[in-house]
Amino acid sequence: MFSFLKPAADAKEKVPADKVKSTYTKYQIGAFIAILVGYSGYYVVRQVFTVEQQDIMHVYHFSTSQFGVILSCFGIGYGISKLFMGAFSDKSDSNRYLATGLIVSSILNFLFGTTRNFFVICLLMIVMAAAQGMGAAACQRIIQLWWGKTRRGFVYAVWNTSKSFGSLICVSAIQLAAFLFSHSISMVFFTTGIIGIFMGVIVLIFGNDRPAAVGLPSISEYTGDEVVLDSGKKTNEELTDLNVVQILVRYILKDKLVWAVTLTSMFLYLVHYGVISWIPSYLIQFKGFSPTFAKWLVGIFDLAAIPGIILGGFLSDIFKNRRAAVCAVGVVGVILCLISYLVSNNHAVLVVTLILLSNFMVAPINLVGLIINEVVPKFAVRTSTGFMGFFQYIVGETAATAMIGFLVEKFGWGMNITVLFVAAGFALLLLLYIMSTEKKLEKA
């Protein structure tokens, strides 16, 4: 298993110079298919609990706070997993790493369909989170290795839409399984598990590790791509002899900009999961929506974010990589939408608000993930992703699930929105700092 995940060796035969461009394009298409299909698959298997939360709570007799604990088990496990799996995956074959995490997650989905025990489900959620931690870091490293900085914002944005497609596929698969198997929750887990395995196989077929493994020059040689570190030093290195701890200390823990981006992402995740994790319960219990429509809104919420994700990435490239400024505009939009989400009772207005909120919110989440990758060397990309993911999920998603679950039971749904306002405010302040730092680095 571990030999399967080792990085591919450099190809002995190099691609002829006159064929480099066409060959690069061919492999970029394959890499794009792999990351888009692969990460969609991760969301197909992980969103079942969010979409089916009302039915699971009813059939399994779980309270809102218990369900919040289940979701937070994923957040805690995923945060730890992203830190360690992200760091160690810098030494692996990115494409195989991506496929392995998806296939293992899909197999775990079958196990969810065999139990209703609260504690067993919590344990399985932690194991699922560990496997899920292999996904985003692998995709982000693939993007860093196969595309130069001038196109990376757009590619990164389009890749991030895979979350939306994955959520929609998940909702569709759940509705199909419910129709075919008389609303059996077990069959819902089995159906999404089968779909996930199939998508993992597609990743293995289309993807590759890195350009050098197929005889191509590195992206740095091909496009002149470089990274400007917090110190002002420029680097284009892809591999290093430094161990994981040395990379973590030297290029992550000692970098103030990395910390600022990480904390920004943490607050943005709190807002994101504070909304999406509770869409069905909030709209059914507090706004009078029907259960079926509320479920579909989970998929619609993610799918509706596609224009914002792509536009945000495109604008951040057009405005000379001013990614933090684009993020700040998005967060202002988030704050305005949260006001409407709290005070309005009109169903049409709430649906429109969710669509706008998804665009304003997911675009900054997408871009801070790219910012963190662009301020460290390529050999530290997945370590930086894992470090940020640790805070995103250990603090951000846990606060958005377990903490909000308890607060809602005690104080009502208004407390949920209050927490989200505070988190959005902190994110905006941090983005202003990042904007000023980006300008200094550009002059370095």
Image (tube, grey):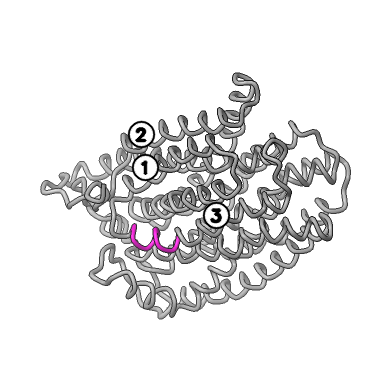
In the rendering, at what x and y percent does residue 128 appear?
A: 48, 48
Depth order, front residue of 46/240: 46
Image point (79%, 43%), residue name:
283
Three-letter amino acid code of the residue under disc 3: Asn
Residue 366 circle label: 3
Three-letter amino acid code of the residue under disc 2: Val
Q: Is residue 177 visible?
A: yes
In the rendering, at what x and y percent does residue 51 appear?
A: 65, 39
In primary-sequence order, the first of circles 2 and 3 is 2
- How far, Cα to Cα, is label 2 from label 3? 26 Å
- Is residue 85 highlighted in magenta? yes
Left or right, 208 with reference to 177: left
Depth order, front residue of 244/337: 244
Residue 201 circle label: 2
Image point (25%, 68%), residue name:
240
Give the structural element (helix, strand or loop) at label 2. helix
In which quadrant of the rendered image does the C terminus lie? bottom left
Q: Which residues are magenta?
A: 82-89
Give the structural element (helix, strand or loop) at label 3. helix
Residue 408 circle label: none
Q: Of discs 2 and 3, which sits in the foreground?
A: 2
In the rendering, at what x and y percent does residue 385 appear?
A: 45, 61
Q: Of discs 3 and 1, which sits in the foreground?
A: 1
Residue 99 circle label: 1
Circle 2/circle 1 CB separation < 8 Å:
yes
Residue extending farthest to the left is: 12
Q: Quadrant of residue 60?
A: top right
Vertical order, 384 against 302 (above or below) = below
In the rendering, at what x and y percent does residue 81 appear?
A: 45, 58
Q: Residues within 10 Å of mark 2 (few under 14, many from 20)?
A: some
